[in-house]
């Protein structure tokens, strides 16, 4: 039986332990925003199971990553295995994950994949795929504001 993703506190930092393809399990580092979402907002603790929806979203958005590897976030998210089943995200968690996605800048090459993830999951109940912004989109918006000043 596959082990669902779970949060771990190891080496004085929070990480998420996830099954990856044929490679077994790996511990993913968390960005500050991803850690705040899981620990502060959703109140997950050490060894708590993290729902597939949340895990996959964090991996796609770059909030959960393998520190020593230069892996495309999309490839990494697609390689997550054994993540279905386990714990389902509550309506409040779906809302919190949607707010997280609206607040982060997505790498340009991953924008369409993240939008598709929103459209095909319960995230579509809390946000529109059009709410996803790339770093480039956000920078262009800031340039437009600066020009108007």
Image (spheres, rainbow, N blue to C red):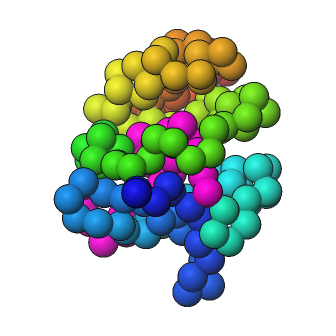
Residue 19 magenta? no
Choose between 45 and 145: the one closer to the eye: 45
Outermost residue toward the left in this view:
22
Left or right placement of residue 107 versus residue 58 in this view? left
Choose between 73 and 139: the one closer to the eye: 73
Residue 125 can be seen, yes or no: yes
Left or right placement of residue 149 versus residue 113 in this view? right
Outermost residue toward the bottom in this view:
11
Q: Is residue 14 above or below residue 72?
A: below
Total labels: the figure holds 0
The image shows residue 111 at horizontal and vertical percentages of: 38, 27
Residue 39, located in which quarter of the rendered image?
A: bottom right
The image shows residue 61 at horizontal and vertical percentages of: 46, 41
Q: Is residue 122 above or below residue 104?
A: above
Residue 62 magenta? yes
**Quadrant that contains the N terminus:** bottom left
Q: Is residue 7 above or below residue 98?
A: below
Outermost residue toward the front in this view:
1
Look at 63% across and 69% down and name the residue there: 47
Residue 19, located in which quarter of the rendered image?
A: bottom left
Look at 29% across and 66% down and name the residue there: 24
Residue 25, located in which quarter of the rendered image?
A: bottom left
**Quadrant that contains the C terminus:** top right
Residue 103 can be seen, yes or no: no
Q: Is residue 78 above or below residue 120?
A: below
The image shows residue 104 at horizontal and vertical percentages of: 57, 39
The segment highlighted magenta reads 49-71
Look at 68% across and 54% down and name the residue there: 38
Look at 66% across and 15% down and name the residue there: 125
The image shows residue 9 at horizontal and vertical percentages of: 62, 77
């Amino acid at each position: 039986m596959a082990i669902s993703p779970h949060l771990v506190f190891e080496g004085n930092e929070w990480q998420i332990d996830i099954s990856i393809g044929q490679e077994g399990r790996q511990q993913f580092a968390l960005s500050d925003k991803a850690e705040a979402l899981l620990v502060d907002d959703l109140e997950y603790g050490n060894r708590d199971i993290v729902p597939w929806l949340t895990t996959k979203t964090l991996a796609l958005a770059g909030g959960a990553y393998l520190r020593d590897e230069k892996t495309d976030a999309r490839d990494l998210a697609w390689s997550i295995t054994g993540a279905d089943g386990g714990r389902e995200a509550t309506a409040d968690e779906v809302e919190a994950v949607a707010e997280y996605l609206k607040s982060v800048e997505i790498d340009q090459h991953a924008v369409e994949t993240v939008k598709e993830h929103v459209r095909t999951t319960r995230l579509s109940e809390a946000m529109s795929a059009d709410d996803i912004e790339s770093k480039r989109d956000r920078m262009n918006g800031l340039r437009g504001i600066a020009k108007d000043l």
